[in-house]
Amino acid sequence: MLSFDNHPAHRILENSCPLYHTRVSPRAEEFAETAGPNKRISKSSVSTMAFPSPSSIPPRICFPLVAILSTITSCEQEPIAPAPNFVKAQWTLQAPLPTGEPLRDVWGSSGSDVFGVGDQGVIIHYDGTSWREMDSGTDVDLLGVWGRSPTDVYAAGRGGDEDDGKLLHFDGHGWSPVAIGSDAYIRDVWGDDTGEIFVAGDLIFRFDGADWSVVETPPESMNAVWGSSANDVFVVGDLGTILRYDGQNWEPLDSGTNKDLRGIWGDGPNNVYAVGDGTIIYYDGENWSPMASFTPRGLRSVWGNTLGEVYAVGSGGTLGRYNGSQWEYVNSGTQFTLNGIWGDANGEMFIVGHLGKILHNDGSGWEPMSSGSGGIDLYSVWGTSPENIVAVGDAGVIYRYDGTLWREEQIVPKVGLLGVWGTGENIIFAVGDWGAIFRYNGSRWNWMSSPVDEQLWSLWGSGPKNVYAVGDSSRILRFNGVSWSVVPHDFDFTMWDIWGTSSTDVYIVGSQGTIIHYDGKAWRRMESGTDKILMSIWGQSADAIFAVGELGAIRFFDGSSWKPMTGAGFRNLTSVWGSSFGNVFAGSFEGDIFHFDGVLWTPMFVDEKTNFRSIWGSSANDVHAVGDWGRVLHFDGD
């Protein structure tokens, strides 16, 4: 399988400018947890990913770079004229919202006053109607949040190369740092109504209403803190460590486990629950004892309501409920790791997790509140209407847009998805790693038998019984309505995209500027006039077709020959789509989107740039572009 680093857009870019050799990847851990064995980004403690040098790439991957290296003499870009009547906010971020950063904890004073905290200093607030991001004043990872009232809230976390701790306070107007007298790594915060506050981490801190002090040096790193009062506080941590404070001293308790404990909650000193790596334990006031768990997966947080129900969340979308007699599995609707849970006295509950995931339950079931998920690269987008759009990407993610939110529809295990196309709402195909092919039947995605194991990048068809898929090793596959088979031909090039007007008018573009055409009888090479990689093709009709690729390559077919077009500078164009000849969009790996009005290609304003992979629209006033980190941008025609 080719790695992320070998995606065509990356291959193009790799040797053009040194600044693209390193890419910040704060979400490597989240990729590792969700992607499975063939993840494109492996689990790592480092925060950067270095792209491979040309010498480290196998010859099969290197050959497209030869033309690039011989063409580029510097990192200077061809000047691009600003768009006429340049209007700000042409393309706006649609997902992930409210954030794509991993969320680590959640707390609120009520169902209309909820705070979520996460990586890179992210703090989001829910006012009963919508979530909005707050200015935390820091970029440290925030791991715990707790408050006494809407105007007295604390967030605890870590940051910097040395994992220095940081405590923030919200007074109802803004967040400001709190000096606790140490830069030790901290993970959680809790307090009572009398004014006392406890912070847990590598050390345990206490605020007595006037001053902060270190009150205990635990034997292990501590991960969570909770108490029934200022004189009854529990702290749990690694290797099953539990300490209890009685108002005078900290005493170790026998947890009965050596597994790391991540979360703790109770409704009194004699009814306390702790969860961790594959374990749930219960304290009855005298002893801790194990409970029969509903899952072998690691659990991150636990919380209970006034109805006697207790909930636990964890890795892989794990959600469980204790009904007073046993733990039972609950379908969360996601496979992304869930890190924190909290609810109000009325039973309204909130869960936050990796990649900005937010779930909400108002008593009628769990529903997503976040749109999309950050961190997972999206490679292709296609739809049937403004209320039915599908995007696919790394780690087998499939998202569907219903006109309001991008929702996680399904995750196909162990495979990355690179292309999506269909004939209607109930017949959709997706292709990807290892020759994988999936078909949506109106209710779920099912794996189809594939005759190849090479990467498949794109697909298109004239109908449900005539679908083509193309990819590495010059592979062309055809589906006849029953099975997929390899189409024989005499060409040798990597095929990046396919498009056509009918079953007797089909085009494939790829490496070395290659374009081939099928007329219903045979595949024939067309003269493209370029040796640059062509990565995407779209047309209005048989005499109005656009192909785009590396270093600003744009080719237009007027029905008789392919002609060059200019306007994108040296930008590496990865996708093209239009609603008509005078309304065509092209996205680039550098984060630019260009528009063709029938005369000129000009750049558009992009609210938040990303490495764009695919563009599709339902009309001239409803266009979506998808790319890295789960970014989805939308153009509404204004």
Image (spheres, rainbow, N blue to C red):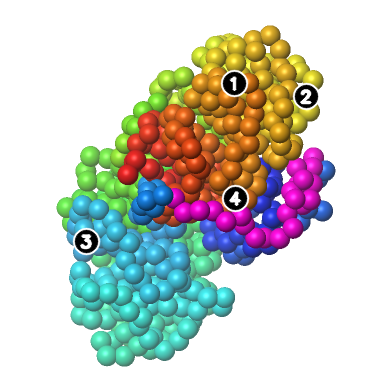
Alpha carbon distance from label 2 to label 3:
62 Å
Quadrant including the N terminus: top right
Give, as a three-letter code, the residue at label 3.
Asp
Does residue 114 belong to the magenta stretch? no
Q: Of tags 2 and 3, which is closer to the observer?
A: 2
The residue lying at 44 percent from left, 33 percent from top is 582
Which residue is disc 2 drawn over? 491
How far across and how far down the image is residue 445, in percent? 49, 26
Q: Of tags 1 and 3, which is closer to the observer?
A: 1
Alpha carbon distance from label 1 to label 3:
60 Å
Which residue is disc 4 drawn over? 569
The residue lying at 21 percent from left, 43 percent from top is 363
Alpha carbon distance from label 4 to label 1:
26 Å
Q: Earlier in the sequence, mark 2 or mark 4?
A: 2
Alpha carbon distance from label 1 to label 2:
22 Å
Q: Of tags 1 and 2, which is closer to the observer?
A: 1
Which residue is disc 1 drawn over? 559
Asked whether 508 or 627 is in front, the reply is 508
Above or below for 267 versus 30: below
Alpha carbon distance from label 2 to label 4:
30 Å
How far across and how far down the image is residue 192, in percent? 24, 75
Asked whether 592 or 565 is in front, the reply is 565
Q: Earlier in the sequence, mark 1 or mark 2?
A: 2
The reply, left or right, for residue 530 in relation to residue 284 is right
Give, as a three-letter code, the residue at label 4.
Gly
How far across and how far down the image is residue 382, in percent? 46, 31
Above or below for 136 versus 414: below
Q: Residues within 10 Å of mark 2 (few under 14, many from 20)?
A: some
Quadrant including the C terminus: top left
Circle 2: element type: loop
Segment colored magenta: 60-83
